[in-house]
Amino acid sequence: MKIIIRNCKLSLLVLLIVSFFGCSKFLDVVPDGVATLDNAFSNRNNAEKFLFTCFNMMPNQNAAFDYPGNIGSDEIWWDIDYTAMNGWSGPQIAQGNQNITNPFQNFWDGGNGGKSLWIGIRDCNIFLENISRVRDISEYERERWISEVKFVKAYLHYFLFQLYGPVPIIDKNLPVNVDPSVVRVYRDPVDKVTDFIVNTLDESMTNLPDIIDDPAKEMGRPTKVAAAALKAKVLVWAASPLLNGNPDYANITDKQGTKLFPANVDPNKWSRALTAIKSAIELAEQNGHKLYDYRNPLFNIAGEIAMNFTLRGVVTERATQNPEIIFAPTTSANTFQNYCTPNFYNAQVLTVQEVSAPMKIAEQYYTDHGVPIDEDPSWDYANRFKTQRNADATHKYYIAAGETTAKLNYRREARFYAHLGFDRGLYDVQSQTGITTSTVKNRAGEAMAAVFSAQHIQTGYYIKKLVSFRSSITGSAPSAYNYTIPVIRLSDLYLLYAEVLNEVKNAPDNEVYQWIDKVRTRAGLEGVVASWNKYSSVPGKPTTKEGMREIIKHERMIELAFEGQRAFDLRRWKDAMKYLKQPVEGWNFQGKDLNYYSLTTYFQNRNYTYKDYLWPLNQNSIIKNSSLMQNPGW
Amino acid sequence: MQLIFTIKGKCWPMSAFFPLPTKPLLRRFWCMDTINKILRIMQFTAVIIFFAMLSVSAKTMSQTVTITRNNVPLQTLFNEINKQTGYSFIFDDQILKSTRSVSLKLVKAPLNEVLDLAIKSQDLDYSILHKTIIITKNLNPVPQLRKDTLIQGLVTDTLKRGLPGVTVFVKGKGGIGTTTDLNGRYSLKIPEKSVLVFKMVGFVSAELPADRPIVNATLKEEDSSLDEVVVTAFGQKQRKEAVVGSVTTITPSTLRVPSSNLTTALAGRIAGVIAYQRTGEPGMDDAQFFIRGVTTFGTGKANPLILIDGVEMTTGDLSRLIVDDIASFSIMKDANATALYGARGANGVILVTTKEGQEGSAKVQFRAETSSSSPTENVRFADPVTFMKLQNEGVRTRMPGTRLPNNEADIYYTELGKDPIRYPAIDWQNVLLDKMTINQRYNLNVSGGGKVARYYIAASNALDNGIIKMDKRQNFNNNIKINKYSLRSNVNVNLTRTTEAIVRLSGTFDNYNGPLDGGTSLYNKAVLANPVKFLPFYAPDDGNIYTNHILFGNNENGEYLNPYAEMLKGYKSQDRSSMYVQFGLKQNLDFLVKGLAFRGMYNINRFADLTVSRQYKPFFYALSPLLMGAADYKLNALNPNGGTDFLDYVPADRTVTNTMYLETALDYNTVIKEKHTLSALVVFTSRENKDGSYNDLQSSLPQRNAGLAGRLTYGYDNRYYAEANFGYNGSERFAMNERWGFFPSAGVGWIVSNEKFWEPLRNVVSKLKLKATYGLVGNDAIGEAKDRFYYLSNVNMNDTGRGFTFGENFGYNVSGISISRYSDPFITWEVSRKGNFGLELNLANSINIQADYFTERRSRILQTRSAIPSTMGLQATPKANIGKAKGSGIDISLDYNKTFSSGLWAIIRGNFTYASSKFELYEEPDYSATPWRAHANQKISQRWGYIAERYFLDDEEIKSSPLQTFGEYKPGDIKYKDINRDGRVDENDMVPIGYPTTPEITYGFGMSLGYKNFDINCFFQGSALSSFWIDPNAIAPFANVTTGGMKTNRALLQVIADNHWSEDTRDLFAFYPRLSPESVANNSVSSTWWMRNGAFLRLKTVEIGYNISKNFAKKVHLKNIRLYGSGNNLLQIRNFKLWDPEQAGNAFNYPIQRVFNLGVNLEF
């Protein structure tokens, strides 16, 4: 009996214990196959997704309002009467509201129009650490992907470097659950950052393809040329006055006493940049890159229109038709393009004609003699805001016949008419059968006037350059031809080459003139020396280093207008304070008939100070990471 | 003729169910036989119905006899019985001759009982055959041991009220017994020298020697006695003496409030519970409650584990519980009491058990209540004319030169009030809402049972109405109407003598019908609509005579919010049902080891929610501009194409959840050598919860827990007690290595008053007990629900937002991979170390005091890693078990119980809880330069903000003061202190301000007084040491809050109209700063300007009850009738005058309700 009882007890206990240990299984609720980061490198398909994830973090040059090179500087003005738009990041910066409590276009922490590029850098590092685990991939492809990710990693560092100056270099990822003291990284000095980016690009160059073999799938991916060109741009950035011995920053040390900025100007930096540009150009030309030239085998068009299309196509033609493009990651410019398009449509369209160019940008273009409007005595500078009727056959491709427009719009270089649309100006696009020409009518009460307060351009100058000649301007809604604003194109390199040569040499010579003249020739202008000699009131300007520097800068601002370059160039040259404080002016969009042609100020004196040269860090970032230093002035 | 049928000894006059013609004249038309037949059928049917209802019952008798005869021969008795029952007798005259006369005094006694008494005592026997009783000689006569005596008596409670239904039996001879009648009287024939036992549920049994002919007994109620039973973890009942942990068991009836939400009754009733209620909207009015405050700052669970009948439930389940169904309500507070719940009990445990049937006749209790509910107070708003004037002032003073929203002529004519159509002045609240609503509640429960089975069944219905008005032109109802039904059936069955099975079934069903987005939203819309722009609706003009929809008013392009249209445009219906099925088995294992028992329980819950909305798009009309000289008005249709006059369907969420719970336990109890008591318990539990409403993989996985817990207790001589517990728990949330947690605890108790040396003091201090416990408890419910698996990363392998496109025609798109959580295999339990030191005191047998001092240190609190800089490049901020917090406090409860000789009785109860907790370790940026920003050593619900000095005087002062970085500001806006004196007021100048937002002190006290049939009780409840902040964004007048794309203008609080900074008054300390048409960022940052003291004391309930005299009750065949009236939230004492501080910062919330309630409670 006792045995039975004991057995009973035992079995009860056993039952209890068994049911208990059954529990370890019971608690395993997570089934196999729940995605973890390991899955990202389990096969080629997933690894490819991760590759594209790395590209995803590159700042989008096509974002009109959120890219630091677009609205926010002085080149593009938005519809300030559209109150909702004023809260967007670019307009906030343009109105002088940049701050440290919640910075706009925050590419450090992400937010307010920016995205945290550190996330992209971490992704790149994860990719580089794990890509060796993928088995079903050819060695060639693996090497190429590694190189591409290194390119992106360098690009992201370079972008941060452009915005914030000295930044921490994140070459290796720290584990997620690392001690807080380890994650408090310091900013690295300018020279170290430069070297790191350059080295990474050098590494990437080894296995990048020379050209894209399969444009249908791969157009937009970086090539060896792109890496070489980017390296050149990085070195020019480091050699330029903002960071090369800028006296404003000379004495700045961080919290551990490191000097973050080089105290003295180092001319060797220009030489180093020169080598890089030279080899980038050589490499580009070896691989078939050349300046774009519009050709149409289907029908004959006037030379002016062909030139117009050439000058617009340098940006709006895709890389397969445009050998000038060196790097243009294929993000759609459609939204930006629509913002630039005049409302030609027979219905109200909410996405069009929202951005424009201020008056000073219209004034910036040369006369038809290829010299600045205030240097050409044959051009009536004093009366440029007066109006004139177009009775002149020379303008028949630019201004509607018999119509009256501002004198400013007469006798300008081809790029003026290619880059800008204006009241009574002609607007050409190419269709299957030929050319469609429309006239812009922007005066109050007209087709493209303000329909209601929140849909109009203020200044009177449409940005025609960013509207592809393949886009439609008829019907009831825009049908935009999809393209990407290039990050780097060949004339950018040519102009940089001229700029760097001019800095390296004691005085400009033919080598300098040669590179800038290539760009001018393509725009239908004579060479620098000839033009100034013949038409300028200061004919000797190209002969001095300073004069030539000014000419190169001016040429750059015209040639690369609206491509997201000027904002960076002005900062690089330390010219931003001079330009960005200027008022925003334009024609009077509320004026009827010729009352339209009265100069109107839309925004007075933006308060741009030396601190604005570098982006502010969110003060919370400084509090979180006490090793970080705020940028000067903030 | 009186027809009676019986159920288990209770007599029911047939007329109570089926009214009979009573006038003799009428009766003649009834053939007696027919009546008898009909009645018998009816009786039978009724019995069947009743049996079906009660499901179980013991032996029943269909016939009863009432006999009051002295010394009558048996034959006379037989005639009497024949008359009353129709039964005929067959007997041998010879047999009767030798019998003696009998004296009987029986009321409605069952026939066999009468026969037993009359015949079996006389060497006779009987048998019943087809309504015939055959009397025979008893062939095996029972030898009479002793002479029986008839004992009579009255059984009363301590208040000298007769107790019906008390079981009276002879000790040692369960067979000889009876129960008391409605008046508490009994009579019983018993052998000589017997001892009578008086027993009744809820009362302490009494034993009295039956040495007199009249033996009266007084029974003490159980819960007022010292020998209380405390329900501890897993429903174990422990003698209060023996408990060393901190457990409070309260009488469920103290939780009764005139509300269908139980959680609103918790505040101030129970020592150790901190509770507050922020809104009074029906269906949304759950109070928030914490046991001994909040000592964690993680984002996970901070409120207690709620167990109903041993099964983990939600706050919603608790709130829907019917107080009448509750058998016990326990709060477990310290580590020792909650240890068995290990990983689930860190925030305390609330354990509720529902009633079970007791052996005995059917007891029926019915309660009906009807209550009126209206806001405790209405926030005062300025009139429409003032609104217009001050809206203009706001625009004028902020944006001079801008067009004013109201032109002077409009203001003039609105003020004149002669043309209310063209110049409307609308009180939207009045248009939309009634002042008061009536709610009803009905509860019915029946319990009883026999030897084999016992049952408790209950049904309840509550009907809560909202205060929303209706429009007769529409055929659907859009007022809030919540119909809650609940059914409960608890049945215990003795399968064998040692096996008991328990089946509990319960279901609650809510049918909600109400406005589209709930009552609060509509309440908010009423204070957001512009009062002067348009009428709620217009009467049809000439052009709209044939229009068949309501012509809702609006303005301009029809973009203004018209709450009347919002209210009428549709309705939402919501059906929620929760079902619980529980099966339990208790096996006494005495046959193995004496004192050993096994029990098991399996429980399944299902919850389902189905919501459907239907709505149309209202047509809006605006008044046409005035025609010259025309008196008539004309309406313009604003959205002739946008409106619809038919209903459309709007899909909504559907929720289904399924929970399974399994519990098995072995329990051992023994007493060794009388002085040593020993008990041991081992429990195994597992739980699984599935939720169908999640829409990602990780959340969709079942939630599981499993655990093994044990308890060992030892008691010596009712003086010394020791206890040790452990919980070993597993949670599916953690990685393999961290999955199991071990949480031990131990405690000791000493009843000083049971020591010999205490004897002389016992009259003054009848009880003194000291106790102390210490232990560990865990919490696995850390972090948010979607982040359960911290050891796994959450990777989106197909994130289209993180992909990229390459290719000439933008044709090659590959989506990207993103991470929303990084894996961290080290994430583990939050652990709490709790200590408790308690004291129990009984003074002069009438004052009970229980006081506890507690400490708590929480560690491994899950915290977002705030010190990880962006340069780490993480897509999601990781969390880690970093935080530490500590808390301490006291809770005291006191009650005084006294019955005076005059029959007056009084109970005074009070309780007080102070709980305070602080951050100890909190990962945050290095604040050494601004130490006031650091969390360490600050209270857990501490708020940070700026120190507001006053309003800026003028522009000069603004120029000379530190720069404030929140937005534009002018004279009349708030000036803040620059704490670190760096010339700018920014984040670095935020300091801890005010008391914590969760009150540190919660207290309550109340008194019950009774005299004869009357009783009155009142209860006060209060809280102190808390601050709240008026939400400046929520009260900003005129502000346009986008509500479904409609333009709004928030109503103007009267206090702002009366007391604001204006350019004329320039009052630097006015209630409200310079007016503005919108909320002003500079004035709405967290600051001391809007800080108010949240302390209050409110008269929570007053109840007056009257028990109708027993005699009357008897006449209507009821056991007890109680009528009562009560009021809830009657008055409040506080500093803050503008609105009820319990609803905190937002004046525009649905207010807390004042309820007046009338009820009747019937017991059968």
Image (cartoon, coloured by chain):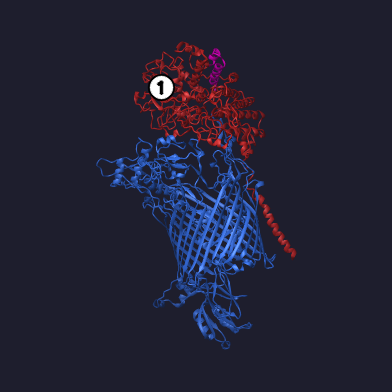
Chain colours: A red, B blue
* Residue A493 is a magenta residue: yes
Q: Residue A281 appears at what percent x and percent y?
A: 58, 19
Up the image or down, A184 lies above or below B1003; here it is above
Res B604 visible:
no
- Identify whether B29 is placed above or below B884: below
Q: Label 1, on which residue?
A: A425
> How many residues crowd around disc 1 within 10 Å: few (fewer than 14), some, or many (20 or more)?
many
Quarter of the view holding residue B956: top left
Most frequent secondary structure within the magenta stretch: helix
Range covered by the magenta-colored residues: A489-515
Residue B100, quarter of the rendered image? bottom right
Q: Is residue B443 magenta?
A: no
Q: Residue at x 61, y 80 (%)?
A: B193
Residue nearest the viewer, comparing B63 with A52: A52
A602 up-or-down from B1057: above or below: above
Label 1: element kind: loop
Quarter holding the N terminus of chain B is bottom left
Q: Report the chain holding disc 1.
A: A
Say what amino acid the circle numbered 1 marks.
Answer: Gly
**Residue at (39, 23) in percent of width and height:** A423
Near-viewer residue (B98 or B24): B98
